[in-house]
Amino acid sequence: MKRLFQYQARRCLFLLCVMAAAALLAGAAGQAQNQLPPGTQLPDSGAEGKGILAPATTKPDREGAESKIEQRDFEAARPLLEKYLVGNPGDARALFDLGYVEDAGSHEEAAAADYRKAIAADPKQFESRLALGLLLAHQAKWDEAREQLEQATLLTPAPPNPAAQAEAFRALARLDRTSDPTAARNALVTALKISPETPADLLLTAQIAEANDDTELAQTAYQRLLASHPAPSASLASAATGGLVQILLKQRKYGDAEPLVKSALTRDPDDPALNAQMATVLLAQGKNDEALPVLEKLQQLEPTNTSVDQMLADAYSQAGLPEKADPIYARMALAHPEDEDILAGQGENLVRERLYPQAQQVLERAVKLKPEDGDAWSGLAFAASENKQYSAALHALSMRSKSLQETPATYFLWATCYDNLHLSKLAQEFYRKFLTAADGKFPDQEWQAKHRLVALGGSH
């Protein structure tokens, strides 16, 4: 009857994966907007030639625009560039400048159009390839982004800029991190050959290794990052802690994971992924009372996240608070009427509320959607038995046995259903099976089984 913890943990791990992906996209968004693409910079007035923008012969309007860009006065730069481009529509550098101005203003479509014009004017312009690739990745246009980033890795910035070139390889590694971890690793190795390792590289190394099922390397890289001096930024530390905790959760090393998550939460108490991990760690250790306030906070942080609602409802139900779980399950079932996991959880919670007719109806819908869910069949068997529908209960027990082993509880339920249907021989058989399996651990039910065996004329 009782849902196994692994089932609840599976929901949480799925939630964490979703949150991790959201965090990765958020990081990419931060890089793609309001600044030049990572690894690039504007011309340095005190050190000509260090930036990615070619220091070729300049024009007054373009030169003035680039001065405004350097001052981050993008609105003043735009009209100067537009005026210049009227007479010089094929100037790839000016088109890149205008794309960057639009990018900095979060005008993504205009920025992409300008970067494409710059590439059309000069297909070998590294800077627009990199900027467009990053922008497309931010828009989740993965194939187009990969095409531009791969092209960027084949080109050379003008003037040469190893940091910018390395960033093209790093961006490609981030893009392929989960879809092609081998290619991602190769891209990162190339980046490290032409630029120094950064704390972010350690994080990326760990993430690539984890995607490649190299748990040992991933764990080592996460630990190196957390122990590095100077200390990593708060965002990197949180990401590394989250990754390391995920590994420990998969290894079921909950005691090792708990202090790491607690430490991370002192730095970032409102991080949804960290709160989800803390709830998982506590639930795994049977610390339901401590897990509930964490889940309640997580629901406030993620009010529209169904996975969070499921975790909280499950925790309430398991903690003996089915009345608190009931409205959450009802809301989820209304929004997702074909979700078997939600229906199974709702049905079992209704059993705990002793609302057996409602429970039977919900669980019948659940097993119809997923006939292999043995736990749902267990709940259905119990609800049907309480509703005195013994034949339905026996059918549910039979279906349950296809995926789960018998327990003392199911043996007893088989026996009582047969007993109530006056199938004496079968009832005696299962009472005896129950007594053998129970082995003195269920005194009340064992007394009842022995009593019924005598009444049915059998020996116990």
Image (spheres, grey):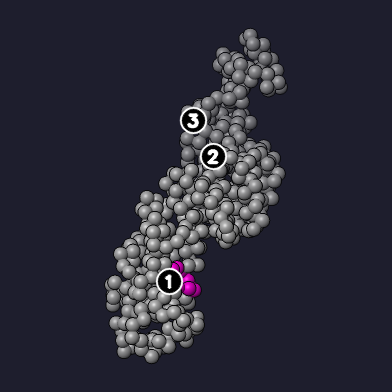
Determine the secondary structure under disc 2. loop
Q: How crowded is mark 2: few (under 14 residues within 10 Å), some or many (20 or more)?
A: few
Q: Earlier in the sequence, mark 3 or mark 1?
A: 1
Tag of residue 403: 3
Magenta region: 32-39
Q: Where is residue 318 in the image (x, y as percent from the top left)?
A: 65, 40
Q: Position of residue 366 (x, y in %)?
A: 52, 40
Q: Where is residue 127 in the image (x, y as percent from the top left)?
A: 37, 72
Amino acid residing under circle 3 = Ser
- Visible residue check, residue 314: no
Instruction: Tell me how far mark 2 sits from mark 1, CA to CA.
Output: 41 Å
Q: Mark 1 points at which residue?
A: 40
Q: Toward which corner of the image does residue 344 lie, by quadrant?
A: top right
Q: Magenta includes 250?
A: no
Q: Which of marks 2 and 3 is in front?
A: 2
Instruction: Tell me how far mark 2 sits from mark 3, CA to CA.
Output: 25 Å
Q: Nearer the viewer, residue 214 or 384?
A: 214
Tag of residue 251: 2
Q: Magenta includes 37?
A: yes
Q: Residue at 29% of width from left, 82% of height from top?
A: 90
Q: Which of marks 2 and 1 is nearer the N terminus?
A: 1
